Image: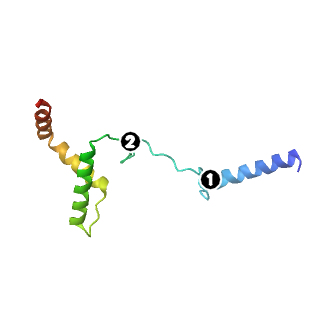
Amino acid sequence: MSSDDRDQRSALLRTHVIHAAETEDVPAQAATPIPSPAARTRGRHTFYLDSALVVALNRAYRALAHELYPAEVSKSDFLEALLTYGLERGQDIKAALTTRTDKP
């Protein structure tokens, strides 16, 4: 195959791909676009917590999931509910933290 034949074939394929993308026969991009940070509702975050607290959280989650069965509760929903509950009670949290930090 000569260079001219390859160039003609490449040009023909390009026009086919462009036409197909315009008519939405095939997606214009193969990869799924990453949503903007404002559009994301959940994300992976890292927190360093006391190991005993994590054990207690896991036990509380399993107990709650058992009580609510057959309804299913994800661990992320459980943790979000705990955090939301705590955020709504900011003064109580502030008092608990102040008391805890006042101890020698």
Mark 1 or 2: in front is 2
Residue 64 vs residue 26, the one in the foreground = 64
Location of the C terminus by quadrant is top left
Residue 60: percent from left, percent from top = 22, 56
Q: Residue at x 74, y 52 (%)?
A: 13
On screen, residue 20 above or below 53? below
Left or right, residue 78 beside residue 32: left
Q: Amino acid at mark 2?
A: Ala
Residue linked to disc 2: 38
Name which residue lies at 27% across and 54% down: 58
Query: In the drawing, does residue 27 fall left or right of residue 36?
Result: right
| 78 relative to 96 in the view: left or right | right
From the viewer's side, name the closer residue of 75 and 43.
75
Disc ID at residue 50: none
Sequence-wise, the earlier of marks 1 and 2 is 1
The label number, if any, that marks residue 21 in the structure image: 1
* Amino acid type, mark 1: Ala
Mark 1 element type: helix
Residue 37 x/y as whole percent = 41, 41
